[in-house]
């Protein structure tokens, strides 16, 4: 089973002032002039890793998914099981579980990974993967408004507050007592001697507009992607992607996404979304067309030169094409 430390706050978090030295060589991701209340969720089948022949290739594929999600500010990744997918080899972890475990590992700041994730065969090749270099992975010398932390085993301060490991040379005191091993997002103090404030992980996004990592969720099938949505009111806009979707949306300048608060973008596997729907007993029994499941059903790469586009390639192509439209619709 996937192991995840308890968290304080609803979901996940960006930057304020720690005890820091010179700025890092590479610039940190910039905060926008205003916060971002809207979210983008990404759903894809875990079975896409089952086609990779080796552990290294499976891990590399998940690394590409994590990089794409970080580059395009995805707030949630849902890994769903696709009925009818080829079963994993006996010596392999199920594709969905493997993908979710590696995504959680990659999203976690490097300075917390050893304390949070025990050794596991699925993580054998993670050292080969490119780092996400996200806003919630600050360097020790970087001054930032927020940091990810882990409540330490030590007693904390004498006034009953806990101490937290936040990637600095010394632990910081937080404004409350919490169980050891709890992962937290903290707002760093503005003055020496003040404790760091434990805040909801969504606060850096909502106040500064920073992308503060992504949550990872497993869904037993495609309908569960919607039914187990963690946002109040669910996803108010869902978008399916397929080479059989609408290809004319890119032709003119009149295309606009409807305004949304929580957007869901669903990608299919090797053969697309249609086989996933056809293999689901309930959806197939009702004769539901794949396009009917979504508010929009788009071909994100019309005129493709290859017969097939791999899911990890479709993520980069599709999210890049949609980004200006999601920003405009989410902000409206």
Image (cartoon, rainbow, N blue to C red):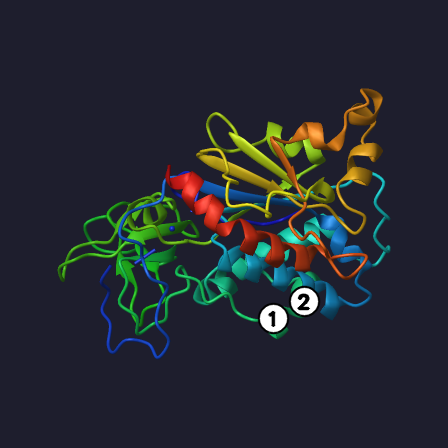
Q: Is residue 315 above or below residue 29?
A: above
Q: Which residue is mark 2?
A: 60
Residue at image x 79%, y 52%? 270
User: In which quadrant will I find the C terminus?
Assistant: top left
| In the image: residue 195, left or right of residue 320 | left
Label 1 packing within 10 angstroms: few (<14), some (14-19), many (20+): some
Q: Which residue is mark 1?
A: 129
Number of numbered discs present?
2
**What percent of the width, then of the height, locates residue 226?**
61, 31
**Residues at marks 2 and 1, CA–CA distance in whole angstroms:** 6 Å
Residue 99 in view: yes
**What percent of the width, then of the height, locates residue 187?**
27, 53
Q: Secondary structure at mark 2?
A: helix
Residue at image x 69%, y 51%? 302
Q: Is residue 103 above or below residue 199?
A: below
Label 2 packing within 10 angstroms: few (<14), some (14-19), many (20+): some
Residue at image x 75%, y 49%? 269
The reply to whether callout 2 and callout 1 are in contact (CB within 8 Å) is yes
**What percent of the width, then of the height, locates residue 4?**
54, 49
Between 237 and 208, the one nearer to me in the picture: 237
Labelled disc at residue 223: none
Residue at image x 50%, y 55%? 72
- The residue most toward the top is 286
Between 323 and 140, the one nearer to me in the picture: 323
Q: Secondary structure at mark 1?
A: loop
């Amino acid at each position: 089973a996937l192991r995840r430390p308890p968290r304080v706050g609803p979901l996940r978090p960006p930057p304020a002032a720690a005890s820091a030295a010179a700025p890092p060589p590479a610039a940190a991701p910039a905060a926008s002039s205003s916060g971002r209340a809207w979210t983008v969720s990404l759903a894809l089948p875990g079975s896409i890793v089952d086609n990779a022949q080796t552990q290294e290739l499976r891990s590399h594929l998940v690394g590409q998914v994590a990089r794409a999600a970080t580059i395009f500010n995805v707030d949630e990744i849902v890994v769903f099981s696709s009925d009818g997918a080829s079963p994993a080899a006996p010596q392999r972890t199920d594709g969905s579980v493997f993908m979710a475990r590696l995504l959680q590992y990659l999203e976690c700041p490097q300075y917390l990974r050893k304390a949070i994730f025990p050794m596991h065969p699925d993580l054998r090749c993670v050292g080969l993967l490119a780092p996400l270099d996200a806003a919630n992975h600050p360097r020790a010398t970087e001054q930032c408004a927020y940091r990810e932390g882990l409540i330490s085993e030590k007693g904390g301060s004498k006034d009953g507050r806990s101490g937290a490991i936040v990637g600095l040379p010394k632990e910081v005191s937080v404004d409350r007592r919490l169980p050891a091993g709890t992962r937290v997002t903290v707002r760093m103090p503005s003055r020496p001697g003040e404790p760091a404030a434990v805040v909801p992980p969504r606060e850096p996004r909502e106040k500064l507009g920073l992308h503060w990592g992504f949550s990872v969720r497993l869904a037993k099938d495609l309908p569960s992607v919607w039914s187990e949505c963690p946002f109040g009111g669910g996803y108010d806009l869902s978008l399916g992607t397929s080479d059989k979707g609408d290809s004319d949306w890119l032709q003119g300048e009149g295309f606009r996404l409807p305004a949304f608060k929580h957007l869901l973008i669903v990608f299919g596997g090797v053969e697309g979304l249609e086989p996933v729907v056809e293999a689901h007993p309930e959806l197939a029994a009702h004769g539901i067309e794949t396009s009917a499941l979504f508010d929009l059903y788009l071909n994100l790469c019309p005129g493709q030169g290859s017969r097939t586009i791999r899911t990890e390639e479709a993520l980069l192509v599709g999210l890049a094409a949609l980004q200006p439209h999601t920003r405009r619709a989410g902000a409206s």
